[in-house]
Image: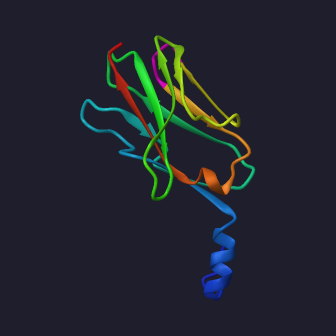
Amino acid sequence: MLSPDLPDSAWNTRLLCHVMLCLLGAGSVAAGVIQSPRHLIKEKRETATLKCYPIPRHDTVYWYQQGPGQDPQFLISFYEKMQSDKGSIPDRFSAQQFSDYHSELNMSSLELGDSALYFCASSLG
């Protein structure tokens, strides 16, 4: 745990050892995509799982990653529980879509470069 009486330089050093993952529009939006968790802070080399619950009756899910100061990058998509397209998803990441059409993005061996905004979208096939 970080101590509040640490000098600023110590805080900066400690914070550089964490990976922050955020989900755009996380939580419930009326008849919208639900993503969880809302925020996630992990140590380097840890794992993380992000979940996406598509709009009801939508059978296609898309995952994106947006790093600081960058445009969103397409990672992967699923249609009817099968991978339909693959973008710039790192080998340390995997994803799947389940029978209820929700999807999970699993990230292992987290790196500082994984600190980003992650979001998913859904559509009708």
The image quarter containing residue 90 is top right
Looking at the image, can residue 91 be seen?
yes
Would residue 115 appear left or right of 16 to someone viewing this image?
Answer: left
Would residue 14 appear left or right of 98 to someone viewing this image?
Answer: right
Total marks in image = 0
**Up-down: is 71 above or below 121?**
below
Looking at the image, can residue 1 be seen?
no
Residue placed most toward the observer, 71 or 47: 71
**Up-down: is 81 above or below 48?**
above
Magenta span of residues: 98-102
Q: What is the x, y in percent for residue 65?
A: 50, 43
Would residue 23 appear left or right of 16 to someone viewing this image?
Answer: left
Residue placed most toward the observer, 69 or 9: 69
Residue placed most toward the observer, 38 or 69: 69
Task: Decide whether the magenta segment is chiefly helix, strand or loop.
Answer: loop
Q: Residue at x 63, y 54 (%)?
A: 113
Which color scheme does this rendered protein use? Answer: rainbow
Q: What is the x, y in percent for residue 125?
A: 36, 12
Q: Residue at x 71, y 40 (%)?
A: 108
Q: What is the x, y in percent for residue 115?
A: 57, 54
The answer to if 100 sits in the magenta stretch is yes
Would residue 7 appear left or right of 73 to someone viewing this image?
Answer: right
The image quarter containing residue 8 is bottom right
If the image is split into quadrants, where does the N terminus sit? bottom right
